[in-house]
Structures are given as structure tokens and as C-alpha cells.
């Protein structure tokens, strides 16, 4: 996996959380290949295509997703009800969009999809046909680990 | 100032409206895509439209192009709030009739500065 991609996605994720969620994430060491399979309750995905093809996926626990939704909406996590999916979709959209912008500055040209979100338990994503994979771990203070996954495929 | 907020994400509409409230604005209408935006714009008088770009149904660009093509006595200022921030995107949005541009993620200060710029330009 191109280190520049990992760095840009890390910076994008931290910027979105710092600016919109009022939270300083602590990035961990990226995991490359199939070694890491993030288990989570809420997964937001945004696909992209153009000079590269792939997918950005955001993984979080229900507790973390509720906290993120509350902070975005300006309410307490306890008041969050049905807003989690839309909120995580928007966070994923902003991460992927910021990532796209950073990569555009390095000569890449992509379009991104509208986000989709899955909320549930005991599931994992098994992509088919992706050539490269990186999982970026982040610690959200008091709310455990979040993961941002980057899947790339060649044409 | 009456503001129309157009975004398919209810979360982003709430974030923008919460930001506007902090900036002292109180009168809002909402729409979830460009088609709804056109309906709301036809129903009422607005001093500012804030719209997303990527929306199902009718995108923000189509919305603004259609709005600008309609005969009107006054030109409503339009601010686009989006993740599409490449130079080509900005040029395309400005050509469609957008007056200014806010790139997500954003701070309340950025929203205020851009609103001041587009409403000042319209005055």
C-alpha cells in the first residue's frame, strides 16, 4: 500500500474529527493486508473511482457511534435515537471527501459515491476483488478504538 | 434573514442550522435534495440558500442551474457546502451559479465569513 495514501487518509480522519466532532483522535500503527479484521457495530462506506478504484470504510462501536452522532448534532449521546446511521454516513462522507481532495493535490482524480451505512452485531465486511488493503486504527478518548479501512483495486 | 438549507443528510442540515443559530440566525426551511429545494424556493422568499452538491434525486449543481434559469426579480445568494473541493469542482460550481463555497469539514467561523461574503455581494 502506498504510504502517501495511508498518510492522507490518516490526516483526513483526524481533521474531520477535530473540526466537526471536537475530538482529537490518537492514530495507531496502520495494519496492512488481511491481518486485521475490524469488528464493529456500525460501518459506513464510500466508494471511489477514477485514477484509482476503491472503498473507504469507517468502523466504530455503537457506543462510539452514539457519541459521535451526539457531538455532531449538538445533543448528549443519551438523546441520540435514530440518527446514528445518518451521522456515521456523513462522517464517512467527509473523511472520504477530504481524502479525495488531498489526493487530488497529488494528481489523483476520483469521484466518490453517496455513503451507505450498516448497523448491527456480529458481522464483518469481506470485499471481493480488492488488491490492497490497509486498516488505520484510532483511539477515541473514553470511547475505545475506531478503524478506517482503505481497500484498493487495480483496473 | 430567511435561509433555505438543502442537504440529503439530516445530520448535516442540523449541523448547519445549529451553526446558523450560533451566528444569530433564526428563520430556516429545509429540503433533502434539489427537487425539494426548488419546491421550497418557489413557496417562500429566502435571503440565502445553503446547499450540498452530492444528493440523490437532483444534485446541488442541477438545483442551482435550474434555479438560476428561472426568471426572478432578485438573485438569491447561494453557498455550496460540500466535500468536492478540487479546483475543477469549484470552477464548475461557480459556473453553475454558486456564489461561494464551503469545504467540509468546516468551522463556524468559515460559515460566517462565507455568509458575510455572499450576502454582502448581493446587497
Image (cartoon, coloured by chain):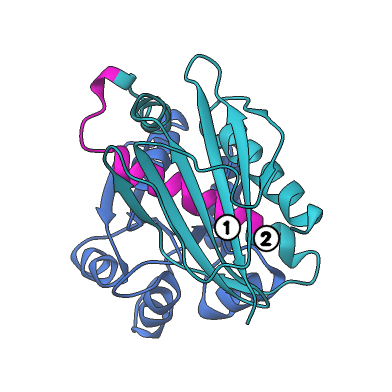
Chain colours: A cyan, B blue
Is A31 covered by the magenta stretch?
A: no
Q: Residues within 10 Å of mark 1 (few under 14, many from 20)?
A: many
Residue to which mark 2 is pinned:
A101
Residue found at the far front of this picture: A35
Chain of the residue on which disc 2 is drawn: A
Residue to which mark 1 is pinned:
A97
Q: Position of residue B117 (x, y in %)?
A: 61, 53
Q: Residues within 10 Å of mark 2 (few under 14, many from 20)?
A: many
**Which of the 4 image quadrants contains residue A16?**
top right
- Residue B123 or residue A132, whichever sits in front: A132
Task: Please tell me whether residue A80 is drawn above or below residue A112 in the rendered image.
Answer: above
Give the residue displayed 26% in from the left and 40% down from the top.
A120
Look at the numbered discs 2 and 1 and tell me whether their residues touch, using CB distance below 8 Å.
yes
Left or right, A116 with respect to A97, comes to: left
Q: Which residues are the magenta region?
A: A78-99
Is A93 covered by the magenta stretch?
A: yes
Marks 2, 1 in one chain? yes
**Which of the 4 image quadrants contains residue B55?**
bottom left
Q: Which element is circle 1 on?
A: helix
Q: Is residue B104 visible?
A: no
Q: Is residue A78 visible?
A: yes
- Residue A123 or residue A103, whichever sits in front: A123
Quadrant containing the N terminus of chain A is bottom right
Q: Position of residue A107 (x, y in %)?
A: 79, 72
Task: Please tell me whether residue A125 is drawn above or below residue A132 in the rendered image.
Answer: above
Amino acid at each position: 500500500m502506498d504510504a502517501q495514501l495511508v498518510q492522507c487518509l490518516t490526516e483526513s480522519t483526524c481533521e474531520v474529527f477535530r473540526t466537526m466532532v471536537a475530538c482529537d483522535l490518537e492514530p495507531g500503527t496502520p495494519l496492512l493486508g488481511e491481518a486485521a479484521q475490524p469488528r464493529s457495530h456500525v460501518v459506513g462506506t464510500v466508494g471511489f473511482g477514477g485514477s484509482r478504484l476503491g472503498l473507504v470504510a469507517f468502523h466504530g462501536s455503537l457506543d462510539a457511534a452514539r457519541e459521535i452522532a451526539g457531538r455532531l448534532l449538538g445533543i448528549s449521546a443519551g438523546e441520540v435515537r435514530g440518527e446514528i446511521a445518518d451521522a456515521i454516513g456523513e462522517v464517512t462522507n467527509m473523511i472520504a471527501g477530504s481524502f479525495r481532495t488531498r489526493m487530488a493535490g497529488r494528481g489523483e482524480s476520483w469521484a466518490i459515491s453517496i455513503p451507505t451505512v450498516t448497523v448491527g452485531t456480529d458481522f464483518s465486511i469481506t470485499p471481493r476483488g480488492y488488491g490492497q488493503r490497509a486498516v488505520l486504527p484510532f483511539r477515541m478518548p473514553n470511547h475505545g478504538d475506531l478503524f478506517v479501512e482503505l481497500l484498493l483495486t487495480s483496473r | 434573514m430567511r435561509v433555505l438549507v438543502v442537504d440529503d443528510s439530516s445530520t448535516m442540515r442540523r449541523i448547519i442550522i445549529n451553526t446558523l443559530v450560533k451566528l444569530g440566525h433564526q428563520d430556516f426551511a429545509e429540503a433533502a435534495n434539489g427537487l425539494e429545494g426548488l419546491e421550497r424556493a418557489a413557496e417562500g422568499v429566502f435571503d440565502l440558500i445553503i446547499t450540498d452538491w452530492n444528493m440523490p434525486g437532483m444534485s446541488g449543481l442541477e438545483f442551482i442551474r435550474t434555479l438560476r434559469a428561472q426568471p426572478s426579480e432578485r438573485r438569491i445568494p447561494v453557498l455550496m457546502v460540500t466535500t468536492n473541493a478540487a479546483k475543477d469542482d469549484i470552477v464548475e460550481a461557480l459556473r453553475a451559479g454558486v456564489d461561494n463555497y464551503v469545504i467540509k469539514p468546516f468551522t463556524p467561523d468559515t460559515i460566517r465569513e462565507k455568509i458575510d461574503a455572499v450576502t454582502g455581494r448581493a446587497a
